[in-house]
Amino acid sequence: MAGITENGRRIMVAIDEGDESIYALTWCLKNLIFKNSKDHLILLYVKPPRVVYSAFDGTGYLFSSDITATMEKYSQQVADCVLEKAKLICGDVQNVETRIENGDPRDVICEAVQKLGVDILVMGSHGYGVIKRAFLGSVSNHCAQNVKCPVLIVKKPKSTAGGDN
């Protein structure tokens, strides 16, 4: 870990398509990063692992390389769009870096924290129940157990009818 230095803290926010990660980012901007600070904000988007396709589909027809290229292009467009939205939310924050990585988010986030010397990791919580979490796994729980820096898991408040969250 780099620690707090004259260059500020290295704060990583894990971003995905969900509202929970955007809420975690806005919470981070309101509560952790201050105007004119030297903190360095890293926005990390992890593209899910590529599905390995056999050369033939279920009916025996050969998959076109155009199809796989189109799927990869779409995946990159989603990543770019999500990070662009996140950068807009950051507004006038000075030191913002965006990164796109590929793989299992649990492993990629933990590796990126280590590799980049992150001081604090901020993540949203999808709020899965016990059963869903058992089947799908919890990225935030995995990271909290495996990274060597503090992890802040921001839970989005449940919206209320007519409430303004």
Image (cartoon, rainbow, N blue to C red):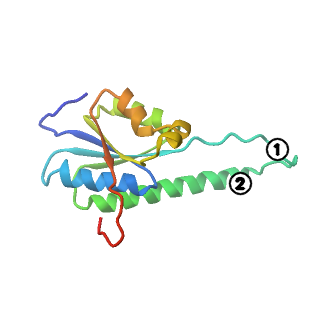
Element type where label 1 sits in the image: loop
Among the 4 quarters of the image, the one containing residue 7:
top left
Image quarter of residue 5: top left
At 29% across and 31% down in the image, what residue appears?
117
Viewed as shown, does residue 149 lie left or right of 56? left
Placement of the C terminus among the 4 image quadrants? bottom left
Can you give x and y, in whole percent of width and height, for residue 81 in the image?
Answer: 45, 60
Q: Could you tell which of marks 1 and 2 lies nearer the N-terminus?
A: 1
Q: Is residue 44 left or right of residue 93?
A: right
Q: Is residue 115 visible?
A: no
Observer-nearest of 64 and 164: 164
Q: Which residue is mark 1?
A: 56
Residue bearing mark 2: 67
Q: Nearer the viewer, residue 97 or 156?
A: 156
- Image mark count: 2
The residue at the point 77 percent across, 40 percent down is 54
Quarter placement of the N terminus = top left
Q: Amino acid at mark 1?
A: Phe
- Residue 11 vs 72, above or below: the answer is above
What residue appears at the point 34 percent right and 54 percent down from the top-left corner?
156
Find residue 139 and report its horizontal and vertical position in percent.
44, 38
Q: On the rendered structure, is 35 left or right of 51?
A: left
Name the residue nearer the viewer: 165 or 39.
165
The picture places residue 136, in percent across and down from the top left corner, at 54, 40
Residue 58 percent location from the top left of the image = 83, 46
Rendered view: 19 above or below 153:
below
User: Which of 27 and 88 lies nearest the eye of the viewer?
Assistant: 27
Q: Badge 2 local density, few (<14 within 10 Å), some, or many (20+)?
A: few
The amino acid beneath tag 2 is Ile
> Secondary structure beneath disc 2?
helix
